[in-house]
């Protein structure tokens, strides 16, 4: 197999480089591209933005919709939020907050990330249910099995300080194992103040406070592997400046179980499941002053669970994977408003979204140079919600009565299809062509917002939204073409894509929304397309110096909508951006200079009066030293010129366009110390 050998050998060199030199750093694995050495520069938790999503800035085609220091929503190829299937240790974590204050990637503190895998291009159907916008997987650190017969301990201790918000973190992870059994325990503490944006001026409210711990046990023997994990998160007062309220707490636990059985002859069975229960409180008066003087708080909870079963088997000289996936989630939200002497609203009452799905995926090497992957997935989703209630019968009476009179049960059925061809042109170059049809059903918020509210999955556009029980599911037709070229010295990996989406769900100023007044939109179906290009490239100048670069461009437009629009741009699409990095590496010493640029974004959405943003350039320098194996001292300065800037994906301060966008962190000097064994 020329292709396989070519890919394997090309991947081996840089992969080893990563493993040896950056053992304590999260590994960013971009599936469908060569692993490349350019991932260096993420010191453990150096960034003032703390969650796993901050790693996405180094993934071609990816971006982060940043609503707070712990609230980063993944974006890939212009799609974001629950359009992207994010799995953390196999679990499709559900958000406790209806406004995505705790998106899936934010559940994992950056220092505990072992790897972040992003499927570049079209996500295979096997990667999960509803992968219209792609698929990402986070694996957390859990220690390792012993290689020999004895007992081995492994672990990580890490701490750090960052100046921009006087942020501190500490991580401790320890595992004890022999070759069959493994048990581990880990804890993380993170805390910081509001970050500075320029000199001593601070962006409020961006303080954060989180503790988490995990424990687990795993067993392996003769092709069997079983694992049971528990993860507990306790996020305290943490700001979300782009949203109408801040996090008072997000608390709760996630249980994970996994089993895999290698039956031999190409047969393998994998089963996993999770159970999650979390509580959340947010308000608009602890970390900020209520905009209109009215204090509000919302208490929410989520109870969820899911399972995945997949069987691999040989078929027609290829590999056939068949599987069944399902999950269910139950949400509640209770609003307490100081209005009219105190009003309680049961805003989401026993709101459910259940998914059932099965798939088959066949991969085969057709010739020495050509491989093919074909997948199909059928999904059934149903949603329902109980009646809403308001303690003050006068308040929201018309909306409440109208909503409660309706049937809330909704069913969605759809078929996802994909075909991915990979062709090795020669030993150094391969080309990948992907075609797919992918779907997503409306979120429970888009269906069940019975009166205008801001609980919209983190859109942060300054508007409130009305739900729409008549929404259809989105269907995207996707084309994706990528080229990978790599020699011993250089790599280049450009990619172009075009997605045509029918029934894309977004807000519109519909007739119904029109009667409600300004800044109120109704969730609607439109037809849209998103296209773009991204690339990454690198070149080793000699054995010590190397240069890496990345570039991203995306454009999203509405093609047809049921109402007239001033322009057809989609909302929250990152402007043209890129990065270059020069790295020096020699026996334990490493240093890099990184330049990041974002162009002005003028292609802004008319339907929600999106504001334009100016372009900016940033410079970061980083260094690390490993005096003895496993001990790494890291330091660096981010945003070295203390540039005051606003990210186009950052939302508006206090959820109000009149305040302008949230400012991003100013100069940050950080130092980290970590030891792994
Ligand atoms: Cu919330």
Image (cartoon, helix red, strand yellow):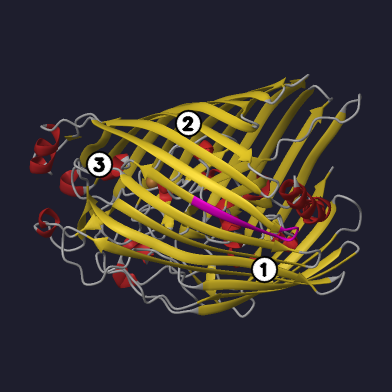
The one nearer the camera, 511 or 207, is 511
In this rendering, the label closer to the viewer, 1 or 3: 1
- Would you say 323 lies left or right of 319 here? left
- Would you say 667 lies left or right of 442 here? right
- Above or below, 313 relative to 428: above
Within 8 Å of ligand 1, the CB of disc 2?
no
Quick check: marks 2 and 1 in contact, CB under 8 Å? no
Quick check: marks 2 and 3 in contact, CB under 8 Å? no
Of labels 2 and 1, earlier in sequence is 2
Q: Disc 2 designates what residue? A: 359
Residue 243 location (% of width, % of height): 37, 56
- Above or below, 608 relative to 448: below
Q: Which mark is residue 564?
A: none
Q: Which mark is residue 447?
A: 3
In this rendering, the label closer to the viewer, 2 or 1: 2
Of labels 1 and 3, earlier in sequence is 3
What's the magenta region? 426-434
Q: Residues within 10 Å of mark 3 (few under 14, many from 20)?
A: many
Residue 342 location (% of width, % of height): 20, 43
Q: Is residue 676 visible?
A: yes
Q: Disc 1 designates what residue? A: 537
Q: CA distance from mark 2 to mark 1?
A: 35 Å
Residue 668 location (% of width, % of height): 63, 69
- Please report the residue visible at 50 percent of the width from the left and 45 percent of the height from the top: 419
Q: CA distance from mark 1 to mark 3?
A: 43 Å
- Above or below, 464 relative to 263: below
Q: Secondary structure at mark 1?
A: strand
């Amino acid at each position: 197999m020329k292709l396989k050998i070519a890919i394997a050998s090309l991947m081996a060199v840089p992969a080893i480089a990563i493993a040896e030199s950056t053992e304590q750093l999260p590994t960013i694995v971009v599936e469908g591209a060569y692993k490349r050495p350019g991932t260096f520069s993420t010191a453990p938790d150096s960034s003032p933005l703390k969650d796993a999503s901050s790693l996405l800035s180094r993934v071609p085609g990816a971006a982060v919709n940043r609503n707070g220091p712990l609230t980063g929503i993944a974006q890939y190829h212009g799609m974001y939020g629950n359009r992207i299937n994010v799995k953390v240790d196999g679990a499709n974590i559900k958000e406790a907050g209806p406004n995505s204050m705790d998106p899936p990637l934010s559940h994992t503190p950056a220092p505990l990330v072992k790897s972040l895998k992003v499927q570049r291009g079209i996500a295979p159907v096997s990667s999960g249910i509803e992968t219209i916008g792609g698929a990402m997987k986070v694996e957390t650190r859990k220690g390792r099995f012993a290689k020999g017969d004895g007992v081995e301990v492994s672990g990580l201790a890490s701490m750090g300080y960052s100046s921009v918000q006087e942020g501190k973190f500490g991580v401790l992870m320890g595992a004890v194992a022999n070759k069959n059994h493994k048990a581990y325990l880990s804890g993380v503490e993170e805390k910081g103040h509001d970050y500075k944006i320029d000199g001593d001026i601070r962006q409020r409210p961006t303080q954060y406070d989180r503790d988490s711990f995990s424990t687990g046990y795993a067993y392996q023997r003769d092709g069997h592997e079983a694992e049971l994990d528990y993860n507990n998160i306790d996020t305290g007062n943490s700001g979300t400046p782009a949203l109408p309220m801040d996090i008072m707490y997000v608390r709760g636990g996630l249980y994970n179980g996994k089993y895999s059985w290698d039956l031999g002859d190409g047969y393998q069975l994998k089963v996993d499941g999770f159970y999650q229960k979390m509580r959340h409180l947010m308000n608009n008066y602890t970390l900020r002053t209520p905009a209109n003087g009215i204090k509000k708080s919302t208490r929410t909870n989520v109870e969820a669970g899911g399972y995945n079963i997949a069987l691999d088997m040989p078929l027609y000289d290829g590999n056939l994977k068949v599987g069944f996936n399902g999950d269910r989630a139950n949400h509640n939200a209770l609003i307490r408003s100081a209005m009219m002497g105190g009003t309680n609203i049961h805003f989401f009452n026993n709101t459910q979204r259940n998914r059932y799905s099965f798939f088959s995926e066949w991969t085969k090497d057709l010739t020495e140079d050509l491989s093919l992957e074909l997948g199909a997935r059928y999904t059934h989703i149903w949603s329902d919600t109980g009646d809403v209630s308001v303690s003050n019968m006068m308040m929201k009476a018309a909306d409440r009565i109208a909503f409660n009179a309706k049937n809330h049960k909704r069913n969605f059925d759809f078929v996802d299809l994909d075909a991915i061809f990979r062709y090795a042109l020669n030993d150094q170059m391969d080309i990948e062509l992907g075609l797919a049809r992918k779907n997503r059903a409306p979120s429970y918020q888009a269906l069940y917002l019975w009166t205008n509210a801001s609980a919209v999955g983190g859109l942060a556009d300054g508007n409130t939204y009305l739900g729409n029980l008549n929404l259809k599911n989105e269907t995207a037709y996707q084309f994706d073409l990528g080229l990978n070229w790599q020699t011993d010295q250089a790599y280049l990996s450009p990619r172009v894509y075009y997605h045509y989406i029918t029934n894309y769900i977004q807000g519109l100023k519909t007739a119904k929304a029109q009667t409600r007044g300004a800044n109120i939109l109704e969730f609607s179906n439109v037809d849209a397309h998103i296209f773009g290009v991204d690339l990454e490239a690198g070149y080793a100048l000699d054995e010590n110096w190397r240069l890496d670069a990345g570039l991203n461009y995306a454009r999203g437009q509405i093609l047809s909508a049921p109402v007239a629009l001033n322009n057809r741009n989609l909302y929250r699409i990152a402007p043209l951006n890129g990065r270059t990095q020069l790295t020096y590496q020699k026996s334990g010493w490493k240093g890099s200079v990184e330049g990041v640029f974002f162009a002005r974004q003028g292609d802004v959405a008319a339907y929600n009066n999106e504001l334009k943003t100016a372009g900016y350039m940033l410079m970061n320098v980083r260094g690390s030293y490993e005096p003895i194996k496993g001990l790494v001292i890291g330091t660096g300065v981010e945003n070295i010129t203390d540039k005051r800037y606003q990210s186009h994906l950052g939302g508006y301060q206090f959820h109000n366009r009149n305040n302008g966008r949230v400012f991003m962190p100013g100069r940050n000097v950080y130092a980290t110390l970590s030891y792994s064994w």
